[in-house]
Structure formats: C-alpha cells, structure tokens
Image (cartoon, rainbow, N blue to C red):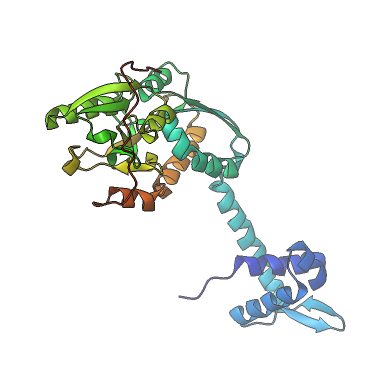
Amino acid sequence: MPAPLDIDQLQTFVAIVDTGSFTRAADKVFKTQSAVSMQMRRLEERVGKTLFIRDGRLNRLSEDGERMLGYARRIIRLNNETIAAFDDQQLEGSIRIGTPDDYADRYMPAIIARFAKTNPNVELYIECEPSGELAARLARGELDVALVTHNPRARSSEVVRTEPLYWVTSMNHTVHEDPVVPLAVGRRSCLWRNLACSALDSAGRDYQVLFTSWSATVVASAVLSGLAVSLLPECAVRPGMRILSAAEGFPALQPAQIGLMKRPGAPTALVNAICGHIAASLDNITPVGTDEKQMSAAPGSSARRDKRPRPDLAVTPAW
C-alpha cells in the first residue's frame, strides 16, 4: 500500500503557490526557508515528479505541479472539513455539573483543563454536594450532569471508573489499634459509611463514629491528624495515610465505582462533550502518592508511629 501524502507538505506547497515565493511561504507556515525547501524535495521524491521549475531567480510550477495543486487543495479542504466535523470548539453555552468534593479535588482539575482547551466558549458551573443530593438536584432539573458514587440501589448511573476502596489511617499514629475503632465518615446516607459499619460488624470489631461530614477534606484531616480511621477510594489516598489490611482487623472491601448521571432534556451536544471528557480523564488518571501508599501498606513498614495518647474525643463533631 503506498504511503500517504503528508498534509503538512501539501500545505507548504499551496502556501508557496499562493504567496509566490519560498521565502514568503516560510513566514506563512512558520518554518525556515531551508525547511520549506526540504519539504518540497521530499514531496517531489514522494510523487516522483518535479513540481517546480527554476526560472532565473524564480520558481514556477511545472505541468505536474499544476496537476498537484488541484489535488493538494482538495486534500487540504477535505482534511479541514473532517477535523471540523469532529471538533467540539464550536460548542457554546453553559453546563451545570455536580460532584462530591472528594471527586472534585482529585478529578476535576484534569477534566476542566481538558474540556476548556477544546471548548473555550462553554461556561462550566460546578457544584459540590453528596451523591444523593446531586441525584435529587438532577431530578429537579437543577444540574445537567452529575459525577456520583455508583449505587444501583439508590440511583441509576453509568459506571466510568472502578478502583479499590481502602481502610486508611495516619502513618504516624496507632489509632487503628484502639479497642474501639474511631471512624471519620460521611452522613448517615453515605454508601461508604454504611459499608464501613457493616464490614466492621461482620469482622466483630467495636467502633464508634466520631467524625461525621460530607466534606472529604474534613474526613481526610481527621485521618491525617491521627484521630480516626476512614475508608477512601484509591485516588483519594493522600501522602501521610497508611492502608490497613485484613491482618490488622480491617476486612477487604468491594471496589468503589464512580458513575455519570445525565439530566433528560439537557443540551445533547454539551452533555455528550463533557461526559466524553470526564470518561477520558478518569481513564487516564494515575493514583496520587502511589509510591508512598505502597510503602505504607507493606508489612513491616518502618514508618514512625506516635505513641502519645489521643486527645479526649467524648464529644462527636458533626459538620
């Protein structure tokens, strides 16, 4: 099968014809004059024909060059039409996106950067709330797209990412060894809170919910401060956290699934564009703190542990 023609070489060829010289064409295509000359030599070698004839200090098209010009313009036009047909840059308007704050913290920077680059005329409204609230707001027409924890018992969503769910504690404290495990979890409706309680009940571990918040930052702060144990998806595990194992009394958990929900009747083009970017971004994400996470989970980790007594936590904060 013959090698395809180089679009960049064809564009340079047309620029030479349109500007009337190699020098002006070089400025138009942002190349040096020597690079333009090299491209033309390679194009001539590729088609096996001489495209330019030297006429004194000028270069004029040969008969084969005249033939090539018509094909080159058609190929470039078709190339541009093809790109435009699949280009999202023409999208305009606004779209309302909802996500829990832990997903926003980890996922949204890449999603926003990817989407804004190809859709500069689309305004994004992003709101952070628990998955249950987001589903309700979507049903009321207050959001167009929601990135949620997939929970088929409570709502229908399209799974776009699956990752391990871990028990985590501070690398520098031993709160996980307490006879009554202190927990930092979400509100009572939180899927992971209910999963944590059920898992500890099944393992025969005593526990007490000491920190309740739908804010992932608050939960993570309680863990990093050595005040509580929690459970987090892989990408939410932060430096300074240690993953707990079944050997330490914390049973293995089912993977966490992240889903997409779309509002019926929302602008199709905008919704499809943002959902495509979300799915692509989540597929490319690498867990943060991977090296440290693996070290902290390894048996016999040499991480320093603070043996000082915990502060009195008789009063349970609830944010």
**Where in the figure is residue 112, as x and y percent of width and height?**
53, 39
Image location of residue 118, percent across then percent down: 58, 44
Q: Quadrant of residue 211?
A: top left
Locate residue 149: give its quadrant. top left
Please say whether residue 160 is visible from this viewpoint: yes
When asked about the image quadrant of residue 230, the answer is top left
Residue drawn 19% across the image and 29% down it = 179
> Which residue occupies 43% across, 46% down?
280
Q: How many marks?
A: 0
Is residue 13 shown left or right of residue 106? right
- Quarter of the image with the C terminus is top left
Q: Is residue 71 visible to the viewer in this orientation of the structure? A: no
Q: Position of residue 50 (x, y in %)?
A: 69, 82
Which of 247/54 is in front? Answer: 247
Quadrant for the N terminus in the image: bottom left
Location of residue 25 with respect to 54 vertically, above or below:
above
Image position of 284 with respect to 115: above or below? below
- The residue that appears at 50% across and 43% down in the rendered structure is 110
97 and 264: which one is in front?
A: 97
- Rendered residue at 64%/76% (across/down): 43
Outermost residue, front side: 308
On the image, the x and y values in percent for residue 199 come to: 18, 31
- Judging depth in this view, the residue of 118 and 211 nearest the camera is 211
- Compared with 128, 34 (above or below) is below
Q: Give the residue furthest to the right.
A: 56
Would residue 21 be found to the left or right of residue 318 on screen? right
Q: Nearer the viewer, residue 227 or 281?
A: 227
